[in-house]
Image: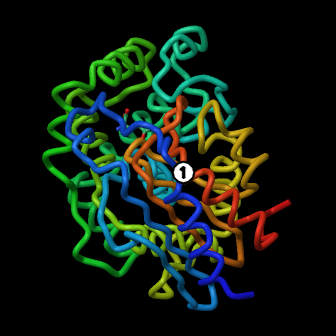
Amino acid sequence: MDYQDILNEIYEKVMSFKDRGIPASYIPELAHVNPENFGLHLRFNTGETYGVGAYHTKFSIQSISKALSLALASSFKNNEILKRLDVEPSGHPFNQLALLEIEHGIPRNPFINSGAIVIADILVSKLKNPKQDFLDYVRDITGDDTIDYDYKVAQSEKDTGHKNYAAAHLLESFGNLKNDVNEVLDFYFHQCSLHMSCTQITKAFYMFANRGKCVLNKTRLTEQRVKRINAIMLTCGFYDEAGEFAFEVGLPGKSGVGGGIAALLPEQFVISVWSPGLNKRGNSKLGMLALEQFTSKTQLSIF
Ligand code: DON
């Protein structure tokens, strides 16, 4: 199969779309991005790579980072993840608070915002210098020291992230936040502000497609943990659109409001796409379409 041809066909199709969705603006700094951008990168476990469009351009990975923070938190022995979080799809938007109150401060899963804030809290407890240590972890799994936070985006979310402050306080009221709200959210906003390209994302997610072994051949997750994180990506990675993504694309994955999506087929490949315009559920409109086209044309999905 000529994968480059397939990526080129997908590129042509998505670039012909007039309605590209709308970039997120609730984090004001994200609204500056050009919605015409589109990048796609494919990395097979064999080492072959293919790319099309702006796949070297860095963007705000936002919630894609939640898979990486979950991976780091899962790698500690005696972690409290399963005591403090559930692993069920929420069927509600990523920032919804009602369910958190009804379910007594136990987030439905680690990928909705409240769940990712609990994971951030666990990391703040475990790490000596949380922001630097998490950044070092991402640099380590990718073998790329140029990866950094976008401090303007982190500050922009700090200034406007009222629902995340509400979620953190609600968690605290139920005894499910151990550290100071401001410290946990400062870590969480930086984690979400990671500024990475599609090529860097396919490297970071390689360990999920390769039984826990990273691009530089170091093992950073057990096979059991990889299996579990991939299961959570499949069932919860796209919030109230997780069913639709499984139905259309058929891969475990994780989206972010910066318009990025990372997805993978265990033992085979990682694919990452970026198109900043979002659909109504906060997932990249053309990113989802491109991945649907890819798995339909290649018949490479878990189903
Ligand atoms: O907490 C937030 O709202 C953002 N930092 C991340 C949300 C996000 O990316 C949801 N994904 N589609």
> Front-most of 37 and 82?
37
Q: Is residue 69 shown above or below 297?
A: above
Residue pointed to by mark 1: 286
Quadrant the C terminus occupies: bottom right
Circle 1 packing at 10 Å, graded few (<14), some (14-19), many (20+), is: many
Could you tell me residue 225's position as x and y percent?
Answer: 63, 60
Q: Is residue 64 shown above or below 51?
A: above
Q: Is residue 9 left or right of residue 251?
A: left
Residue found at x 60% / y 51%: 288
Could you tell me residue 8's position as x and y percent?
Answer: 57, 76
> Front-most of 33 and 209?
33
Could you tell me residue 291's position as x and y percent?
Answer: 64, 59
Residue found at x 34% / y 50%: 126
Q: Is residue 144 left or right of residue 88?
A: left
Residue found at x 67% / y 56%: 252
> Front-most of 139 and 237?
237
Quadrant the N terminus occupies: bottom right
Q: Where is residue 181, by image quadrant?
A: top left
Q: Is residue 63 shown above or below 88?
A: below
Q: Mark 1: which amino acid?
A: Leu
Disc 1 beta carbon < 8 A from ligand 1? no
> Front-most of 201 and 8?
8
